[in-house]
Image (cartoon, helix red, strand yellow):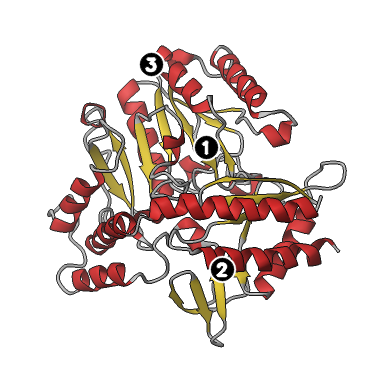
Amino acid sequence: MAKLSPLLKQATPVLAARGEGVYLYDTDGRRHLDFTAGIGVTGTGHCHPRVVEAAQRQVGTLIHGQYTTVMHEPLLRLTEALGEVLPPGLDSLFFLNSGSEAVEASVRLARHATGRQNIVVFHGSFHGRTMGAAALTTAGTKFREGIGPLMPGAAIAPFPQAYRYGWDEEEATRFALRELDYLLVTASPAADTAAFVVEPVLGEGGYIPAPAGFLEGLRERADRHGILLIMDEVQTGFGRTGRFWGHEHHEARPDVLITAKGLASGFPLSAIAAPTALMEKARPGSQGGTYGGNAVACAAALATLQVIRDEDLVGNAARQGARLNEGLQKVAADHPEIGDVRGLGLMQAAEFTTADGEPDPGAAQRAHRAAAERGLLLLTCGAYGNVVRMIPPLIVTEAQIDDALGIWSRAVADAVS
């Protein structure tokens, strides 16, 4: 009898039978507050009626229209709709299935466009598990150990993790940019560097927002050296941070933008966006794929965009994110085991540390389990697994935020008692 791989370890004990809005229901009928959203995927909630209707309608007309063989209307309509929310000038799109694929497509484009090989990423980054993306991922060794040699040309610079360094954000930013300059004259010559790839908020790396000035510093250096700035918005895009794109909290704008996760409310779909003049520099045959731009996924993505707009989900993410952060700060004030609370919008986290400031993954895991036992589903992250993150759907209400915070407070009390 076949079984799932033993390496597929579930973060919660739930055997999901159905989902509705912010809730998952298990096979015993128990309701769980889902503050994982499928790792930031179900932004419109589980089975939003408009997304379900759009997908069902599309299934009945065309399921698969391979987009280098034939063209189909959902893909064309989605491309046009995304043009209304993408940063100015990013007017050319290439669709794929997963975030990892989109990351690798952006690297391929950057190397073709610049004629350079090196890609600079930042400590704590997560860009995927496929071989090329894993070479760019430093959120933890589990994503890259034992599979080398990895893709050559990846260079790693510090991300301004102020709490980890024990500095304020301004000092951490100065340090990170100074070390990037040093990298460009030592390990990755500017003339050989094709792109910087950065998350506006570190995801797997610990939910650490880029401080003010860091992305602008990357933009200035990219312009000075002819390097492309690629924003990995796989997790931070589509309203998650309280702006439509995570980088919009800052002035810097990308040359290439990567999106996935919340794009299609649970259907596999990802994309890269770039100016047409840049996209044209990709070589023939370098973009394609059997399932990219699937008709049903595109229909779901169109409905997702409409729901986000009509229900003001970006605004709701900002409002409820502020409420969630305030509540998490109050819990942390009562428990010194939580060393830091941080995030943007509905992308919030609490970091557990020992009395001497060292990472405490044990306390984080206990709090995570205690919350799940009480019906609140969460995830951990960070290099040491000592950060508990909250990623509710963008439709979450004040009452649901308060319900989650009540459960979290009791879970933390149990975990550290």
Q: Amino acid at mark 3?
A: Gly
Query: Looking at the rendering, in which quadrant would you find the C terminus?
Result: bottom right
> Depth-wise, is mark 2 or mark 1 nearer the camera?
1
Residue topped by disc 2: 5
Question: In the rendering, at what x and y percent does residue 287 appear?
Answer: 26, 41
Between 109 and 400, the one nearer to me in the picture: 400
Q: Earlier in the sequence, mark 2 or mark 1?
A: 2
Q: Quadrant of residue 212?
A: top right
The residue singled out by tag 3 in the image is 226
Gap in Å between the C-alphas at discs 1 and 3? 20 Å
Few, some or many residues within 10 Å of mark 2 (<14, 14–19, 20+): few
Vertical placement of 26 versus 301: above or below? below
| In this picture, residue 117 sits left or right of residue 310 | right
Residue 135, given in percent of the width and then of the height, sits at 53, 38
Q: Residue at x 25, y 30 (%)?
A: 89
Relative horizontal placement of residue 281, taking residue 157 as reference (left or right): left
The disc label shown at residue 235, or none:
none
- Comparing 134 with 235, the one in front is 235
The answer to whether residue 410 is seen in the rendering is yes
Of labels 1 and 3, the one closer to you: 3
* Dot 2 or dot 3, earlier in sequence: 2
- Residue 136: assigned label: 1
